[in-house]
Amino acid sequence: MRGKFKFTFGPWNIHEGSDPFGPMVRKSIGFSEKMSMYKKLGFDGVQFHDDDAVPDLNNLKPDQIIKKAGELKNALNDHGLSAEFVAPRLWEDEKTIDGGYTSNDVKCRDYAISRSKRAIDIANALGTDLLVLWLAREGTYIRESKDSKVATERIVSAINQMLEYDLGIRVCIEPKPNEPMDHTYIPTTGHAIALAQLCIDPARVGVNIESAHAILAGLDPSDEMGYALAFNKLWTVHLNDQNGLKFDQDKSFGSVDLRRAFNQVRILDKHGYGNNGEWVGLDVKAMRTQKLEVSTKHLSNSRTIFLRLLELSRSLDETKVDALIAARDYEELDLLIMNHLLG
Ligand code: XLS
Ligand code: MG
């Protein structure tokens, strides 16, 4: 079965270029202007952090949040766009300095859970059943500051409370091994899928695999995807690229290692990704050097590369591949792939 591909990105992927060492270099673009850019760039869906969808939500009551999210839903409809998921942004608030669900302070843990429930309310109002959890600060800078068994149990308990709060919501963990933390508790796809088994309804806990995060964990993103597909748990992806073990770069898809990108497209297509409505999400950032007028090319380029790699994947002579596998001639298979990619 072939895959079916439609694309999303989040408003944070059109950004001002600030980094830990320097301020913004491009002016901010408001969300309504961004909304009008999606279709032109070839995208049909939007990924949201809770406060991308409803700014200032800490100062609003639950019913006010739902009302604002409803207004946003109308605006999305006007643009012919769907919401793919909502992710509670549990890494900026002062109450999440030491983590959300794993914070050592019970008041902060309660805040993280109540904020996650607001994110679920927003997801419902936007017409999506997918909640993404990037567990940004659920980890430590020094091992002694938290107990990893207790932390794991706290994450499970938090997810259980979300599953209980809304019997229709699906929780999608986005693993990442480090940054901002030294080490996080759910660093890989395997960790996330095993964690799902500890939850009250494992069938509603899946993964969002980000290429760069897998690479930062020293793993191959396409193998991570294949693993999640085997569990029917690959519910969304964050495609991008990463040049080795350093900060999370969110480079354009395929821009570092075309063959690695090819294999991600190939595994998704071979196993019918998208036939159950899954989206291809991109989590890419423009280079800081890019001028404002041309600061969305990383998005359209990543999509273009995906589609070109899809053509290559579909035009690969699979009979030859099978014959070389049968002959165990992997050197020749290597050359076949290289020649195919070189065109
Ligand atoms: C950061 C994450 C982030 C999430 C969205 O590393 O990739 O962008 O995907 O919350
Ligand atoms: Mg991501």
Image (cartoon, grey):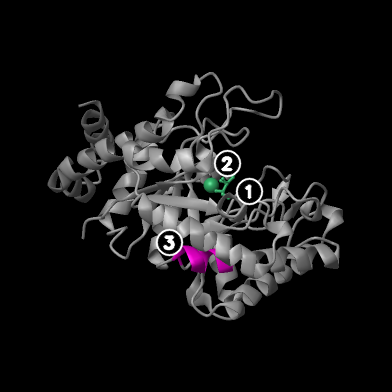
Q: Is mark 2 on a helix, strand or loop?
A: helix
Q: Distance between the residues labelled 1 and 2?
A: 7 Å
State the residue at coordinates (75%, 51%): 93
| 61 over 291 or under it: above or below | below
Q: What element carries label 3?
A: strand
Q: Residue 119's image quarter?
A: bottom right
| 287 over 209 or under it: above or below | above
The reply, left or right, for residue 81 in relation to residue 205 is left
Mark in front: 2 vs 3: 3
Discs 2, 3 touching: Cβ within 8 Å:
no
Residue receiving disc 1: 177
Task: Examine the residues drawn in magenta and state their main secondary structure.
Answer: helix
What is the total number of numbered labels drawn onto the structure image?
3
Q: What element carries label 1?
A: loop
State the residue at coordinates (63%, 48%): 177
- Disc marking residue 216: 2
Q: Is-magenta flag for residue 123? A: yes
Discs 1, 2 touching: Cβ within 8 Å:
yes
Q: Bounds of the magenta span?
A: 120-128
State the residue at coordinates (60%, 80%): 164
- Disc marking residue 235: 3
State the residue at coordinates (61%, 76%): 198
On the image, the x and y values in percent for residue 301 come to: 36, 31
The reply, left or right, for residue 131 in relation to residue 259 is right
The reply, left or right, for residue 76 in relation to residue 17 is left
